Amino acid sequence: MAADKNLIQTLYHTEFQYNQDNREEIFTLDGEIGVLNASGNTDATSLRAGIISEQETLNWNNNYSADFLYKQTEVTSDGSSQDRVSAQRFYGTAQFDYKLQTPGRRFFMYADYENDRFNGYEYRATLASGWSHRMWNTDESMFRYSVGPGYGFVKAEDNVQSNANNGLILRASTEYQYQWYTGSKLRQFLSAEIGANNIKTRSETALSANLFDSLAMKLSFVVAYETQPVGDISGLNTETSLSVVYRFF
């Protein structure tokens, strides 16, 4: 059985592996980009780009990500057509896990920043810290969670009255990864930020399949929801994207 597993791994020769020994220092960086151009009844151009990085040292396990979304649609008004931006967002996160003496137990520090042109805010940011636990990390799967108090920073756009959190919050997150011997990988991430006036949740489901060497195709589905959005902005937002992922190292 073990020989069969080694044969499959050798044939596919995948570099998309996250199950590393905690004592081994690693640094990975994946970049992804997806572009969609539609014409005909609807003329639109969409761009989604991002990076994901993980750093493992003797005492730390750090994760970084940045995501950019842009969409431009052609609209007709008074008999003339013009391009109009319908989506523009930057979202970045960083989490630093300090390893404690007990394997899998960590103390974490988390930060994120969001600048969305169409959500009623100039920016939103979060700082949090607390307890993190990687419950298991095998050759096939990994599961971890984090929970702790934090603080939300919110700046609404001019002439917008916001009832969202700008104060103390409780943040919790979970992440599950499963990797097949072919190199294909499933990732499920969930997070929630609970405050006095608003609850923000985010779900990211991603399935990636290797094309060759360090190149993969990724299908992802993101659901973001908050209980108290600003004005007439929808509290539920979803994104489905197909992108190409390249592992730089």
Image (tube, grey):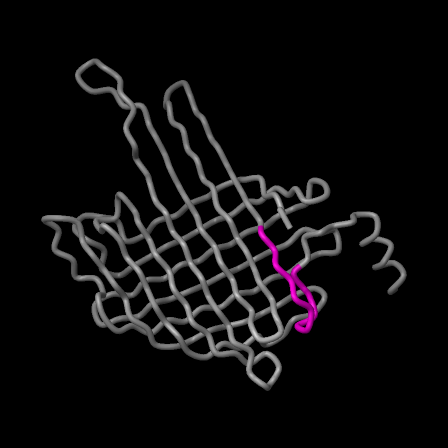
Residue 84: horizontal and vertical position, in percent?
Answer: 28, 28
Apparent side of residue 228 relative to residue 134 in the rendered image (left or right)? left
Residue 115: horizontal and vertical position, in percent?
Answer: 30, 49
Apparent side of residue 67 relative to residue 121 in the rendered image (left or right)? right
Q: Residue extending furthest right?
A: 3
Q: Main secondary structure of the magenta part?
A: loop
Apparent side of residue 120 relative to residue 185 in the rendered image (left or right)? left
Quadrant of residue 202 within the rendered picture: bottom left
Please, is residue 208 above or below residue 106 in the view?
above
| In the foreground, 88 or 184 | 88
Give the quarter of the figure containing the N terminus: bottom right
Residue 232: horizontal and vertical position, in percent?
Answer: 18, 48
Q: Residue at x 71, y 51 (%)?
A: 15
Q: Residue extending furthest bottom?
A: 101
State the count of labels: 0
Q: Residue at x 17, y 49 (%)?
A: 157
Q: Residue at x 53, y 53 (%)?
A: 52
Quadrant of residue 193 within the rendered picture: bottom left
Q: Residue extending furthest left?
A: 159
Please, is residue 169 above or below residue 117 in the view?
below
Q: Residue at x 20, y 13 (%)?
A: 79
Residue 86: horizontal and vertical position, in percent?
Answer: 30, 35
Please, is residue 84 above or below residue 189 in the view?
above
Region rendered in magenta: 18-29
Is 217 included in the stretch rendered in magenta? no
Please, is residue 127 above or below residue 149 in the view?
above
